[in-house]
Image: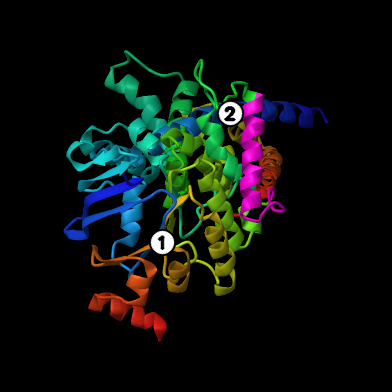
Amino acid sequence: MEEFLSVTGQLFTGFGENCFIFAITLLAALPLGLVVSLGSMSKFKPLKWLTKTFVWIIRGTPLMLQLFVVFYIPPLASQGGFAFDRMQAALIAFIINYAAYFSEIYRGGIESIPKGQYEAGYVLGMKRSQIFFNVVLLQVIKRITAPIGNEIITLVKDTSLASVIAIPEILMNAKDFSMVGLIWPLFYSALFFLAFCGILTLLFSFIEKKLDFYKG
Amino acid sequence: MALLQVEGIKKSFGKTQVLKDISFSLEKGEVLAIIGSSGSGKTTLLRCLNFLETPNSGKISVNNTVLFDGDTKNNMTDSQIRKNRLHFGLVFQSFNLFPQYTAIENVMLAPKLHNKKLKNGANYKGLTKPGEIKALIREEALALLDKVGLSDKIDSYPCNLSGGQQQRVAIARALALNPDVLCFDEPTSALDPELTGEVLNVIRGLKSSDSTMIVVTHEIEFARDVADKIIFMSDGVIEEEGTPEEVIGNPRSPRTQAFLSRFNG
């Protein structure tokens, strides 16, 4: 019993790190992704191609590698003059990575709105911004709820990757127990993820139901 | 002087010239029907009037005010274009209602947005208090939905309305801003045959001494019945223009004759 409690305590402490990375990444990447998506839809070609290249590189390389780059490259390049601490490095890598994925979901959502919706707004004398906020935005939100939910649930589990730059998150702690012969904490840690993802699933089906008052 | 004066409108997309020198005028209270085969430029003309397309050259004036002049088109600011648009209303072939709003919210949205931030001293039909303005906008929207025969559907979402009902909401929405000229772009082309009648009847019912309308349509009988003036367009030019008796009854141009013979079987 004492062993169970101490393992539980350790895993909770570790999961705190996961939740912290999760929350900060979402708070920053959701809006940043919108900025990136606007760049990738820009009519100004250089900006568009720059953004598209950025998204290609971020989506085309492993998140684990990006964590290494953000954590190890600055001190190497500055010969020890500058470095992020571990959590800073993890947050930067996660935020950039998820912003790239979110931006593509936003772009898909925004581009799926028929041109007629904008034109209907224009002939009623609305401004572009009025059309975006009063006509288009809610339709986009409705269309992207499912893919964003998918991505957010992936993020919950991806936070474990922070262990590669030695952030003591839950899986790292569970693995440490296995080194001293305790295997079950590894499986126990799965319950934390399952519970968290279960709550998110409920939350997203609630949002989808809320947005179900109209079709189209 | 005519209410609407269109002079020498030309419009090209790439190398294709869609409108080749279109000129016509329309008196207040007149209904103009534009007929012609697909690709003749009818829709593009309506889109130019509503500033959804910018003509390459030409002039558009309403009430003797020049709204568009091809020579100075690059100097037009966005807010000027928005203001100019309010002289025209447009009812689309595919309705384009806002799906997340109920029928009455669709009608009220634009008036509400236009009166959201009334500057000091400004007023909406004599009212300055936001609450009173909102109530008046709602009252007007109710009256418009009643006019198009939908007073029992005010709180329905577009997805729960038939195509004909949706198009009638779209007509009420366009009327809410009191345009000088209301344009219809093939308003019944996306409807099942049994639903076209209700929409055409609504348009017929709008005809009055102070509502000026332009209807692009394939419904020749409707055009003959409701229009004061008919334009037959072909290949981006006005091939024939006149009263329904002249254009539909006794077409002079061989192209008009050929086009109409397809409808008379």
Among all residues in the image, which is located at the extreme bottom? B265
**A149 lies above or below A177:** below
The rendered magenta stretch, by its main secondary structure, is classed as helix
Q: What numbered label is drawn on residue B23?
A: none
Q: Which residue bears the numbered disc 2?
A: A23
Q: Does residue A208 show up?
A: yes
Left/right placement of residue B245 relative to residue A9 reads: left
Residue A150 falls inside the magenta stretch: no
Q: Nearer the viewer, mark 1 or mark 2?
A: 1
Expressed as whole percent of the image width and height from the top left, the position of residue A165 reads 47, 29
Q: Residue at x 58, y 46 (%)?
A: A142
Q: Secondary structure at mark 1?
A: loop
Q: Is residue A142 left or right of residue B7?
A: right
Above or below, B177 relative to B185: above
Q: Mark 1 falls within which chain? A: B
Instruction: Give the colour scheme shown.
Output: rainbow
Rendered residue at 44%/31% (across/down): A32
Amino acid marked by disc 2? Ala
Q: CA distance from mark 1 to mark 2?
A: 66 Å
Residue at 31% across / 38% down in the picture?
Answer: B64
Q: Residue at x 23, y 49 (%)?
A: B7
- What segment carries the magenta color? B131-155
| Residue under numbered circle 1 | B228
The residue lying toward the viewer, choosing from B168 and B3, is B3
Q: Residues within 10 Å of mark 2 (few under 14, many from 20)?
A: some
- Nearest the viewer among A64 and A51 is A51
Give the image location of residue A54, x and y in percent: 33, 38
Is the N terminus of chain A in the top left, top right, bottom left or bottom right quadrant?
Answer: top right
- The x, y position of residue B96, in whole percent, is 50, 53
Residue A149 visible somewhere in the drawing? no
In the image, is B18 to the left or to the right of A70?
left
Q: Is residue B136 magenta?
A: yes
